[in-house]
């Protein structure tokens, strides 16, 4: 693995293979879980959809399945499709089938969205739930804003540079008041989604963006490298934790267009 810091763009962890990335990601999540449980007694983690959950798969295997204190995990979603929980498009279903059902997480600690209301109501409900948990400090609060401070937010990256359900040129990128908002016009189906806003993502203690494959190489370049003013600002470039730590988990293909050639050999 090649390790590097990239000015204000966080730590880059570039892996020879997807398998190496999977091991490093499991180690990273397990270490953050241990540190958070030691410090706060709980671990509040937000997941996304896509290939991310599969890439976290080693957490279900030895040694992690036995060493991680799963009873202290509280699960949230950085974004969710507004579909029934048993629908093939549901990020909850993806995580349940691929991770949550394979480790001893306490069912009441799993905070999925209300799937029986509109996208707008689901976003409001989800923000309300998070507000209650911030009040009790199950989720920490940012020192600089009133935003929740998740222990870890895990994000994937779309070929268009989107993270969570924050798509390029969409007005929700400018949302500064809401913690959770909704869209009904996602360029990638399904159209109705709820999503954490940038202030919440940027208030987390740790944010990890997990990216594999050459179809993402251009958006990785646009998100990380020093780009000219004529280049588009992709949503992933707006991930800039105020006081938290940003880590990029990349495989060689995803890193192949980064400008620092020593990194993508
Ligand atoms: O809601 C969605 O449409 C997906 O969850 C999406 O946001 C995904 O996370 C990225 O596109 C990365 O996807 P892959 O990791 O599968 O390429």
Image (cartoon, helix red, strand yellow):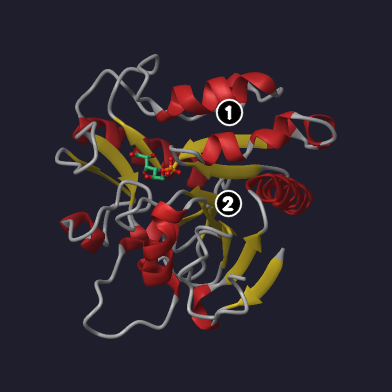
Q: Quadrant of the N terminus?
A: bottom right
Instruction: Residue at 61% x, 77% y: name it.
Output: 5
Q: Is residue 255 above or below residue 79?
A: below
Pointers 2 and 1 in contact (CB under 8 A)? Answer: no
The residue furthest front is: 265
Q: Is residue 102 left or right of residue 197?
A: right
SS assignment at label 1: helix
Query: What x and y, as percent, mark residue 14?
Result: 63, 63
Query: What x and y, as percent, mark residue 77?
Result: 45, 38
Q: Residues within 10 Å of mark 1 (few under 14, many from 20)?
A: some
| 152 or 231, nearer to the observer | 231
| 138 or 264, nearer to the observer | 264
Kindly indicate the quadrant of the structure image that contains residue 15.
bottom right
Residue annotated with mark 1? 109
SS assignment at label 2: strand
**Which quadrant does ligand 1 occupy?**
top left
Query: What x and y, as percent, mark residue 88?
Result: 37, 19
Q: Is residue 200 left or right of residue 81?
A: right
The residue furthest top is: 86
Q: Is residue 12 above or below residue 108?
A: below
Query: What x and y, as percent, mark residue 210?
Result: 53, 52
Instruction: Residue at 63% x, 47% y: name it.
Output: 18
Instruction: Residue at 59% x, 44% y: name it.
Output: 44
The reply to whether the residue tagged 2 has its Cβ within 8 angstroms of ligand 1 is no
Q: Is residue 131 left or right of residue 67?
A: left
Choose mark 2 or mark 1, whichever is in front.
2
Residue annotated with mark 2? 152
């Amino acid at each position: 693995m090649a390790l590097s810091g990239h000015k204000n763009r966080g730590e880059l962890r570039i892996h020879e293979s997807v398998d190496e990335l999977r091991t490093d990601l499991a180690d990273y999540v397990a270490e953050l879980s241990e540190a958070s449980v030691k410090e706060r007694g709980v671990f509040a983690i937000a997941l996304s959809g896509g290939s991310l959950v599969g890439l976290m798969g080693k957490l279900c295997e030895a040694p992690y399945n036995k060493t991680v204190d799963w009873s202290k995990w509280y699960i949230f979603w950085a974004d969710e499709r507004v579909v029934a929980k048993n629908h093939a498009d549901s990020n909850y279903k993806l995580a349940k089938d691929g991770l949550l059902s394979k480790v001893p997480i306490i069912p009441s600690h799993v905070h999925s969205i209300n799937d029986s209301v509109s996208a707008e109501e689901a976003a409001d409900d989800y923000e309300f739930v998070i507000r209650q948990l911030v009040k009790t400090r199950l989720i920490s609060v940012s020192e600089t804003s009133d935003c929740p401070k998740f222990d870890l937010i895990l994000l994937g990256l779309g070929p268009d540079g989107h993270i969570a359900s924050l798509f390029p040129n969409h007005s929700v990128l400018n949302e500064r008041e809401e913690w959770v908002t909704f869209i009904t016009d996602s360029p990638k189906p399904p159209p109705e989604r709820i999503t954490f806003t940038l202030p919440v993502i940027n208030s987390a203690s740790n944010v990890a963006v997990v990216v594999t494959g050459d179809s993402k190489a251009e958006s990785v370049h646009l998100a990380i490298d020093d780009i000219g003013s004529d280049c588009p600002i992709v949503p992933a470039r707006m991930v800039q934790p105020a006081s938290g730590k940003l880590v990029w988990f990349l495989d060689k293909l995803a890193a192949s267009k980064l400008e620092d050639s020593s990194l993508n050999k």
